[in-house]
Image (tube, coloured by chain):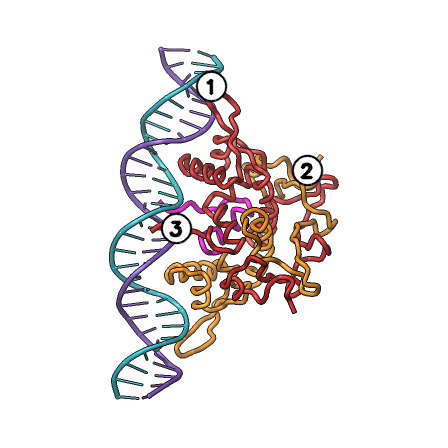
Chain colours: A red, B orange, C purple, D cyan
DNA sequence: GTAGTCACTTGCATAATGCAAGTGATACCG
DNA sequence: CGGTATCACTTGCATTATGCAAGTGACTAC
């Protein structure tokens, strides 16, 4: 009985989770954004068992989020650096950070985002790039796209561009 | 050997993952945002085994993301509706959607966000609420907050407001 | 030549996940 | 009244995944 795969679902959220949805994966990415690159650094930071770290790093490399790069020949030592695909994951971390800070830190914030220029705390919001308006219902909603199959189309109202 | 908990880590991302980081949880939330409320609806939509669905729904109720509400007395039947905490999770789904659409849908987009007023496709970006500027490095970065412990402070540069 | 660093692997226990099947209360049809 | 259907689950049991502890191998530093 293997864990059911989300990879063959059409939904882009499901596809994303197929890559980062496992225990530890997102925390590894978080640390990669903080500048960690080496096995030992991740292990110290996360307090994760080495076999788990090996599996997750391999999976993230496999998924194209991290790149394994040799930084020393003898003995052979690799470091793990974010690819473009990996770096594009950053907005997800920002929204997770904001959500966590709002709901799960009763003792006060331990990590905050700041504007490096002013030092002021930043508050991440998701907006539409074109209009600049904050995404919110019902002004914005998800619809089935051009490549949607029957099941997806049934879930959502109509298809993009064909909204009455 | 139980799965290691992220709940006692200070990081708000880890705290968040403690609530939604399990397999299926985020997809259940996705469906809740699409308007699904009942056990059978989730089961049909997700193609998930009923015992798994029971466990995840209970966990999400426990974590305060969903609320169990009786909609019929005899036989007793409950529906699951998003709480405010659950609704606040929406931005995370938007960023996951955008990331998935960019990287994992070679056959074309199946789900897109649209501006309901114009029908135009929306492109989610994360900005600072105060300045409106897109979050990006190095203009914005995470720092240890007021309630940070030693470990957190070591990971990040300094503390908020104390940036030189 | 002993100890330390670094990135792992191996062995084995426990937990999580998953399928299949069953349960119980009720409604609907004939 | 009997049979089928709906709905939200449980229970049983197999298979993975996760995790700790310990070991390995190739060096480097003292």
Question: Do the residues marked 3 and 2 share a common chain?
Answer: no
Indicate the position of residue D23 as horizontal and vertical percent values: 31, 26
- Give the secondary structure at mark 1: loop
Q: Please give the chain letter of the residue carrying mark 3.
A: A
Labels 3 & 2 near each other (Cβ < 8 A): no
- Give the secondary structure at mark 2: loop
In the picture, the disc for residue B138 is 2
In the visual, does D24 lie left or right of A101? left
The magenta stretch spans residue B13: yes
- Give the secondary structure at mark 3: loop
Location of residue A156 with respect to A125 vertically, above or below: below
Indicate the position of residue B139 as horizontal and vertical percent values: 70, 40
In the visual, does B53 lie left or right of B116? left
Residue range highlighted in magenta: B1-26
- Give the spatial CA distance, label 2 vs label 1: 34 Å
Q: Which residue is mark 3?
A: A3
Indicate the position of residue A6 as horizontal and vertical percent values: 46, 52
For marks 1 and 3, the one nearer the N-term is 3
């Amino acid at each position: 009985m293997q864990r059911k795969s989300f990879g063959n679902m059409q939904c882009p959220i499901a596809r994303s989770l197929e890559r980062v949805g496992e225990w530890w994966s997102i925390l590894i990415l978080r640390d990669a954004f903080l500048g960690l690159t080496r096995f030992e650094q991740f292990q110290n930071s996360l307090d994760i068992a080495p076999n788990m770290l090996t599996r997750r790093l391999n999976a993230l490399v496999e998924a194209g989020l991290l790149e394994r790069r040799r930084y020393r020949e003898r003995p052979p030592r690799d470091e793990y650096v974010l690819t473009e695909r990996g770096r594009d994951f950053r907005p997800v971390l920002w929204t997770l950070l904001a959500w966590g800070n709002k709901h799960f830190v009763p003792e006060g914030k331990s990590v905050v985002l700041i504007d490096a220029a002013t030092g002021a705390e930043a508050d991440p919001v998701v907006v539409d790039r074109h209009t600049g308006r904050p995404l919110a219902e019902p002004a914005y909603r998800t619809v089935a796209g051009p490549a949607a199959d029957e099941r997806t189309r049934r879930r959502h109202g109509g298809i993009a561009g064909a909204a009455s």
